[in-house]
Amino acid sequence: MRIIATLSYIFLPCVILAQGIENKLLRTEEIRIRDPYIFADTVTRNYYMYAQIDNRLGGERDDKKPKGVEVYVSRDLNEWKQPQTVLLLPDNFWARDMVWAPEMHEYKGKYYLFVTLTSSELHKNMKKPEGETNWPAFSKRGTQIFIADSPMGPFKAFDNKPHTPENWMALDGTLYVENNTPYMVFCHEWVEIVDGSIDYIQLALDLSKPVGKPIKMFNASEAKWSTSETGKVTDGCFMYTTKSGKLIMIWSSFGVKGYAIGIAESKSGKLKGPWIQQNELLFEQNGGHGMIFKTFENTLLLALHQPNSPSGQERLILTEIEDTGESLKLK
């Protein structure tokens, strides 16, 4: 009896400590995150913020660490519950080297996680530009969609392959629905084509697979503010319709002050465009990969990560924006 009592005194504080850590709320500034995506659930009045597990654990390309996506839950956007895993990639999945840019969309009563995955395998038919000796690897990379019955997951794959073309380097897919037809808008990576582009492709009604072929919307070089000399980056596309009905897209590249967010607008109000680039940047202070959502108090917010470098310092930045009808601007 004394032994049992002694053991109880030893282990009980450990259990209490573990529970305390598990229940400890995290402040926004404590969470390292790139490519943040926040889903405001009007049913539960919770904010769900999705992040790749590597943001927290580090060790991209380390096969011994879990690969997937986790979610932080908050009531006020200031304090967050400890992350819970919503997607865990199996060891034999087509790509699990790196996990980027998770987005979670509610669509027709289901929940869909868009994730960019990178394989350790390389494309064999791609060639670096002439004279370039330090060009990035042509990794197999694409955006894949996973499905669940809850924003908390678990999310399951439709298939063991990306929704973007398998012979492309593609990333940062997002959902847009036009005339009741779902589309994925995504980036065709500069590493493959030098002047990165943003394209769209029709999806099956249940988002299980692509339908048809991708259509290009524009190239990064069409934006005067995109100043990178080695390759023109397209990142983080996100669709938004202004209060006057204008269809615009925010997207990221590199400007004179570093990573930045610009705005493109469709002259037809449709995905087909034509798309033109607005001259004024939405955000230019070495932060980007933005998305837009409304709080439960109806405040319009831009979410992004900043700084873009050095690695490990990235944090969620929330800033209020104004919908002018013609465009968006910081308040």
Image (cartoon, rainbow, N blue to C red):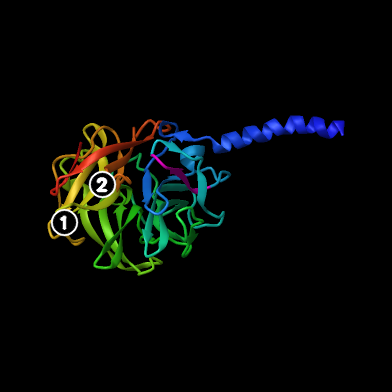
Q: Compared to 111, does 67 lie above or below?
A: above
- Local packing at callout 2 (Cα closer than 10 Å; few below 14, some 14-19, many 20+) is many
Disc 2 to disc 1, C-alpha distance: 19 Å
Q: Identity of the amino acid at label 2?
A: Trp
- Of the numbered discs in the image, which one, if any, rests on residue 245? 1
The x, y position of residue 178, in whole percent, is 25, 64
Of the 4 image quadrants, the one containing the N terminus is: top right
**Residue 75: within the magenta?**
yes
> Helix, strand or loop at disc 1?
loop
Considering every residue shown, the one lying at the far right of the view is 1
Prevailing SS of the magenta stretch = strand
The x, y position of residue 158, in whole percent, is 46, 65
Of the 4 image quadrants, the one containing the C terminus is: top left
**In the rendered image, is residue 90 in sight?**
yes
Q: Which of 89 and 97 is in front in this view?
A: 89
The residue labelled by disc 2 is 251
Q: Compared to 324, does 177 lie above or below?
A: below
Q: Compared to 111, does 299 lie above or below?
A: above
Q: Is residue 325 left or right of residue 35?
A: left
Question: In the rendered structure, which segment of residues is drawn in magenta?
Answer: 67-76
The x, y position of residue 80, in whole percent, is 45, 39
The structure residue drawn at horizontal position 69% and vertical position 30%, both measured from the top left corner, is: 13
Quarter of the rendering containing residue 230: top left
Q: Do the residues labelled 2 and 1 touch (CB within 8 Å)?
A: no
Q: In this view, does 53 lie to the left or right of 169?
A: right
Q: Is residue 50 left or right of residue 67?
A: left
The structure residue drawn at horizontal position 30% and vertical position 53%, both measured from the top left corner, is: 188
Q: Identity of the amino acid at label 1?
A: Gly
**Residue 269: within the magenta?**
no
- Of the numbered discs in the image, which one, if any, rests on residue 80? none
The mark that comes first in sequence, 2 or 1, is 1
**In the rendered image, is residue 58 in sight?**
no
